[in-house]
Image (cartoon, rainbow, N blue to C red):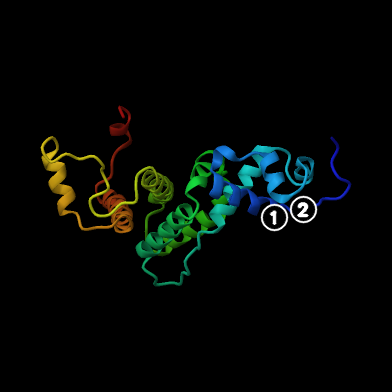
Amino acid sequence: MGRPAKPLISRSATIAASIELIDTEGFDAFSLPRVARQLKVKTSSLYHHFADRRELVTEVAKELMTEATVPEYSPGTDWVEWFVELSLNYRDAILRHPDAAIVLVQFLPRDVLTRTYEMCARILEDGGVPARLHIVILDGLEKLALATTLSELTRDPVGSTGVFPNVDERRHPTLARALEANRWSSRELFVVTIRGFLAGVLDSARTPVSDDSLLGS
């Protein structure tokens, strides 16, 4: 079947419909014919804007990331707290679309965030962070924010004791006591984790690890 002579829908409308479909029916239900039905057009209409399913899903991943607000920054801003806020914004953007989270893992091109990473590197430089630590911070924060948020999505909504499910006091007494002592919510645990990572990286600047010590890892 040929394409319509003129596009019946817009690129942005198709991306929005795709996100809505994934949010309501899950990623397994996503397909070009299903998106077309959502838009009340024929599948061929989608090919005016997207070469194939992969291109559309990639654009969905990009759109999801644009929902994460980049905080305002001015000289003198506490750069650690700026990165905490940025990481929280990415976390919140992912949690708004839990069924689409897998899209970010499989289809988000890393170069989508290059401009943001350039800004982040400048902020680190402004904060006096040595250039040799910039990549480990930027790469680590991306992995940490995504992994911890995806982990959160795989379990039931957590309170202070829901981080590790199915803990039995008799079989896991030490872990049970730790859960009982924990007073942080899942959001607070995320913040503490981000701050702890940054503190650890900065500490490594004072006690650097040699390349030779990493060869066996």
Relative depth, front residue between 127 and 66: 66
Q: Amino acid at mark 1?
A: Ala
Horizontal and vertical percent position of residue 153: 40, 46
Dividing the image into 4 quarters, which one contains the N terminus?
top right
Q: Mark 2 falls on what kind of element?
A: loop
In the picture of the structure, the residue carrying the numbered disc 2 is 9
Relative depth, front residue between 205 and 21: 21
Q: Amino acid at mark 2?
A: Ile
Q: In the rendering, which numbered label is found on residue 200?
A: none
Q: What residue appears at the point 42 percent right and 64 percent down from the top-left corner?
A: 126
Relative depth, front residue between 25 and 144: 25
Q: What residue appears at the point 52 percent right and 46 percent down from the top-left corner?
A: 100
Horizontal and vertical percent position of residue 57: 62, 43
Q: Using residue 117 as the reference point, say whether residue 18 is left or right of it.
A: right
Q: In the rendering, which numbered label is found on residue 13?
A: 1
Distance from the alpha carbon under mark 2 to that under mark 1: 7 Å
Q: Using residue 24 as the reference point, say whether residue 90 is left or right of it.
A: left
Q: Is residue 144 above or below residue 191?
A: above
Horizontal and vertical percent position of residue 111: 57, 47
Horizontal and vertical percent position of residue 17: 65, 51
Dividing the image into 4 quarters, which one contains the C terminus?
top left
For disc 2, the neighbor class at 10 Å (few under 14, some 14 to 19, many from 20) is some
State which quadrant residue 212 falls in.
top left
State which quadrant residue 125 falls in.
bottom left
Q: Mark 1 falls on what kind of element?
A: helix
Q: Are marks 2 and 1 in contact (CB under 8 Å)?
A: yes
